[in-house]
Image (cartoon, grey):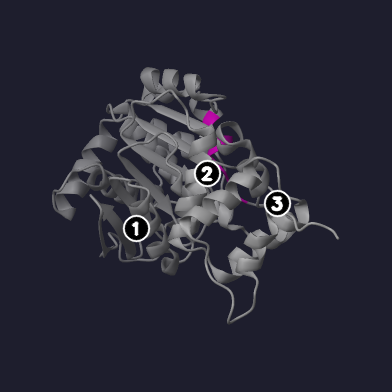
C-alpha cells in the first residue's frame, strides 16, 4: 500500500467539498507553508493547494501562519532602521508608478523606507523594479546592501526573489495557473524589514478586512490597506478611496475624499521618461502631481501625523516642492 504524502491532509482540508471544507488553523498553515518552502511538496500538490485557497479565499489566520513559516526560515538577523514598509506586487497598467515618487520624496526628507515586490509575472504591467535605474538606483541583492542603501539615501528596494526565493518562484506561476495565487497576498503582508508601519494595496475592497486582520495577528503596529490604482498603494486623486487601518491593534476604516472633481482621461502611452521629468521638475503632469500629493498625505498619517486632511495635503505639497532631487538622479 502506498503511504499517503505528508502534505495530502492540507489539500484535503481545503478540498473536502461544500460541507467538509474549512480554513486551516494558523498552526496548520504554518506547517503547510513550511513544507512548501522546504521543497517537500510535489508540483501537483502545490497547484491544487494554491487554487483551492484561491477559490475559498484565504483567511487571516492562514495568512498569519504562512507568514510565520516565512519568518522562521528567511527572517534576517540584520535589523534595518526603517520607518515604513511599502509592498509593490501588482504592477501598474493604465498609469505610471507615481507612488515611487512619493517614496523618493519621503526619503529625500529623512524618512527611511524599505520597498519589496516582484516583477514580470503579468504581461503589460509596469513594475517599480524596472524604474529604479532611471533614478540612479538598483534592486538590492541582500539585507546588507539594503541596510547600506537606507543609510545612504533613506530608500532600498529588494525583490522577493532575493529575500525569499521560493515565494518568488510561486509568484511567477501566475501565467501557468492563469490566476494570481494567495502568495501575492502573503507577500504584501510580510513586512520583512519589521518596520513599525506598513502599507499595501488591493484590487478589490472586500479583500481589505482580510489584510487588516492578518496585520493585526502579525502584530504590525500601524498598517494601511487601500484599493489603490491598479492594486498598488497609490491614491487616485479623482476618486474616493477606502482606507482600512490597523493602529495599535485596533481596526478602523474611512474614505479618503477625492481632491479633484473631474475624471482624468487614461493615457494611451506611458513613457518612463515622464516619471523622471516629473521628479526633476522639468515637466508637470497634473494627474501625477495630484496622485503624489494625495498618496504622500496618507503616508504621513500612517507614520503618525494626526493632522486633519487639509493640513496633511498642505504638508505633502510643501514636502514635494522641497524634495531633494539630486539624491535620486541618474545624471
- Residue 202 horizontal/vertical position (percent): 46, 58
Instruction: Tell me the residue that label 1 is attached to.
Output: 237
Q: From which residue to which does the magenta span run?
A: 125-132
The answer to whether residue 45 shows anywhere in this view is: yes
Above-or-below relation of 10 to 275: below
Q: Residue at x 44, y 65 (%)?
A: 207
The alpha-carbon separation of the residues under discs 2 and 1 comes to 38 Å
- Circle 1: is it few (<14), some (14-19), or many (20+) Cα within 10 Å? many
Task: State left or right for residue 20 relative to residue 206.
Answer: right
The furthest residue to the right: 1
Which circle marks residue 251 in the picture?
A: none
Mark 3 or mark 2: whose residue is earlier in sequence: 2
Task: State left or right for residue 199 relative to residue 89.
Answer: left
Instruction: Tell me the residue that label 2 is attached to.
Output: 69
Task: State left or right for residue 65 relative to residue 326.
Answer: right
Secondary structure mostly seen in magenta is: helix
Amino acid at each position: 500500500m502506498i503511504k499517503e504524502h505528508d502534505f495530502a491532509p492540507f489539500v484535503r482540508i481545503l478540498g473536502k467539498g461544500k460541507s467538509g471544507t474549512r480554513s486551516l488553523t494558523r498552526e496548520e498553515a504554518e506547517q503547510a507553508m513550511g513544507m512548501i518552502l522546504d521543497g517537500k511538496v510535489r508540483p501537483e500538490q502545490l497547484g491544487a493547494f494554491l487554487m483551492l485557497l484561491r477559490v475559498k479565499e484565504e483567511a487571516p489566520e492562514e495568512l498569519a501562519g504562512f507568514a510565520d513559516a516565512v519568518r522562521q526560515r528567511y527572517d534576517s538577523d540584520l535589523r534595518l532602521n526603517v520607518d515604513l514598509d511599502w509592498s509593490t506586487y501588482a504592477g501598474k497598467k493604465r498609469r505610471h508608478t507615481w507612488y515611487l515618487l512619493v517614496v523618493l520624496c519621503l526619503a529625500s526628507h529623512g524618512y527611511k523606507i524599505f520597498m519589496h515586490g516582484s516583477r514580470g509575472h503579468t504581461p503589460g504591467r509596469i513594475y517599480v523594479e524596472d524604474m529604479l535605474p532611471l533614478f540612479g538606483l538598483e534592486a538590492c541583492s541582500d539585507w546588507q546592501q539594503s541596510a547600506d542603501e537606507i543609510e545612504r539615501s533613506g530608500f532600498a528596494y529588494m525583490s522577493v526573489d532575493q529575500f525569499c526565493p521560493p515565494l518568488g518562484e510561486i509568484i511567477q506561476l501566475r501565467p501557468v495557473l492563469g490566476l494570481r495565487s494567495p502568495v501575492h497576498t502573503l507577500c504584501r503582508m510580510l513586512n520583512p524589514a519589521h518596520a513599525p508601519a506598513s502599507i499595501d494595496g488591493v484590487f478589490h475592497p472586500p479583500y481589505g478586512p482580510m489584510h487588516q486582520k492578518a496585520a493585526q495577528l502579525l502584530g504590525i503596529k500601524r498598517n494601511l490597506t487601500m484599493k489603490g490604482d491598479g492594486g498598488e498603494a497609490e491614491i487616485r486623486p479623482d476618486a474616493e478611496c477606502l482606507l482600512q487601518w490597523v493602529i495599535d491593534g485596533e481596526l478602523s476604516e474611512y474614505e479618503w475624499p477625492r481632491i479633484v472633481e473631474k475624471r482624468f482621461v487614461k493615457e494611451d502611452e506611458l513613457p518612463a521618461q515622464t516619471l523622471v521629468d516629473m521628479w526633476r521638475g522639468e515637466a508637470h503632469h497634473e494627474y501625477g502631481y495630484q496622485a503624489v500629493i494625495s498618496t504622500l498625505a496618507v503616508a504621513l498619517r500612517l507614520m503618525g501625523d494626526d493632522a486633519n486632511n487639509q493640513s496633511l495635503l498642505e504638508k505633502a505639497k510643501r514636502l514635494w516642492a522641497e524634495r531633494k532631487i539630486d539624491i535620486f538622479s541618474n545624471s
